[in-house]
Amino acid sequence: MTLSPQWLEELRSRTTLSTLIGRTVKVQKAGREFKACCPFHNEKTPSFTINDEKGFYHCFGCGAHGDAISWMTEQRGLGFMDAVKDLAVEAQMEVPAPDPQAAKRQEARATLHDVMAAAQDWFVTQFNGIEGAQAREYLKNRGIAENTIREFGFGFAPNSRGKLKDALSGHGIDLLIEGGLLIKVEDKDPYDRFRGRLMIPIRDPRGRVIAFGGRILGDGEPKYLNSPDTPLFDKGRTLYNLDKASPASRQTGRILVVEGYMDAIALAQAGFEDVVAPLGTALTEHQIERIWKMVEAPILCFDGDNAGQKAAMRAALRALPILRPSHSLNFISLPTGQDPDDLIRSDGPQAFAALIAKPQMLGDKIWQVEYEAEPLNSPEAKAGLKKRVSDHISDIGNQDIAQHYRQDFQERYQATFFARRDNQQQGQRFQPGNRNFKSKFVSYRPTDDTKSFLIEGYDLQIAKGILGGLIRHPSQISKHFEELSIAKLADSQLQLLLSELIDCAMGKETLDMQALLTILEQTDCYNVAKGLLRADALNFTFNRKLPEDASSDLIERAHQDLAEAIKVVTARPGLEAALAEATRRVQDDLTEESYAEQQRLREAKQEFHERLVELTQLDDIA
């Protein structure tokens, strides 16, 4: 079916957007527009605006933007053509006729919907009849309530090869086969696919039955049996309970993903209605993308056994190539041997709520799984861990995200295997007048995280030394990516050089000084970089040219001092702002607490100064 831009524009013009949105969201008149609390993210103050004249909505909080059609697809969860048809009915417009082949396919799908609806009615009738007693007893033992049974449409397929076929033969045997209700084997009569099973209807986002899942009652394999792929059903793209979870998630701002439909049903009954499940397969890229249209970080709640944790890891790795800014996965680990239903029945809904309140982030999950994959009792095993996580990073499609993961995993690896040695080497570092004084200062960030650290004055001279150190030790750029990225140098040439250094480090996983200078030679920063390498006004360890056979201790100390200098310089603007605010509070309202805070910050400022003095002291580092 081809819809012209002119026809779609007419459809939009005939649709009053505020009325359409107002059916599910409380809207208020605000001048020539309407406003509401955004249905795409949780908020208390309205930042969602609707403009009927221009025909679009926009959220200034989360950036959601669209027209009537996108509202139906994003908020209602409909497919494009389903959204267009629903809007066309209300606008009293005729949808252009499709080409003959498309019309046949559409007619077949419509007929298949009728067949699946008829099968659902028949399964429910059997469930409520004499033959369904075992199925009803099974659900009773699992604690499934009567209203849940009705809401999710449980049914029963008798243990017969032909009862469904006989009951629905009026729809045509071919359609029953096409809908996955019958199995056709060469030279044999078709027979019922589902036999002796508790039946669970699988619905599309509009709530129409498109497939079934059947659980065996008693002994038999497979334990769960799903419909095959059909013109209505693609199990790699379909999520169970999406029709109910989609509106629920708009209230909670959350989506829970469990392994199977019985888990989803048990959670929904316990009050967690924003839950979906894949259908007999690991979570696919298509399913992840579908969930991301509703929330940015769904919570995966897989079983605590080995199979469940493997499924969680498969989902994590499938997400890596399609990660994009602000979109990720979160995880919870259930107690070993328990699924969500087991946990709720044993410890109550509050136990599950406590778990999902503190989920594990994607990077934490990958590190944990790889760290626990094998004993790390040899250098080779430790190197194996480093290679595995590096391989995962290489699968990330977005390079900005990959760089952050690279830095994160490098820091984890360093802290895990070298922290003890670093502590031993540092000992009593940085005592006043002694290079062995251990600093106790902490970082101070600006209260507004969107602002950069403005580095000027004396600190700008320190920054020159840091830039020279980064050129000599380019492997350290990625380790301090976050601080360096939000630092703003008052000198434009130095700022340009800093930006080039960050870009170079992001573009190459491994980089030495000569390779870095070769890259900078093609930029306007080359002369500045060479000048910093020749500068000797600041005598940091990391600015000194080390011999080719320099020991690992010498190199490690230069790296540590460089890290300290970066930390001090990027923290000081925030500290200065915090001290100024504390001084203002003392002036406005002198209390014991406000005075103590001011003095603490003054001492921290002095410690920062002393630390820089210690770093620039000339001593024998050989």
Image (spheres, rainbow, N blue to C red):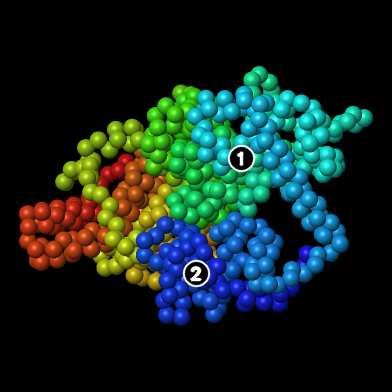
Determine whether, in the image, residue 342 is placed left or right of residue 435.
right
Q: Quadrant of the C terminus?
A: top left
Q: Residues within 10 Å of mark 1 (few under 14, many from 20)?
A: some
Q: Quadrant of the N terminus?
A: bottom right
Secondary structure, mark 1, is: loop
In this view of the protein, can residue 36 be seen by the observer?
Answer: yes
Determine which quarter of the picture holds residue 220. Answer: top right
Q: Please name the residue that numbered disc 1 is placed on.
A: 153
What residue occupies the far front of the structure in this picture?
130
Q: Please name the residue that numbered disc 2 is placed on.
A: 58
x, y percent for residue 132: 65, 28
Give the amino acid at mark 1: Gly
x, y percent for residue 480: 40, 52
Mark drawn on residue 321? none
x, y percent for residue 45: 36, 65
x, y percent for residue 103: 82, 60
In this view of the protein, can residue 512 be seen by the observer?
Answer: no
Determine whether, in the image, residue 601 is placed left or right of residue 227.
left
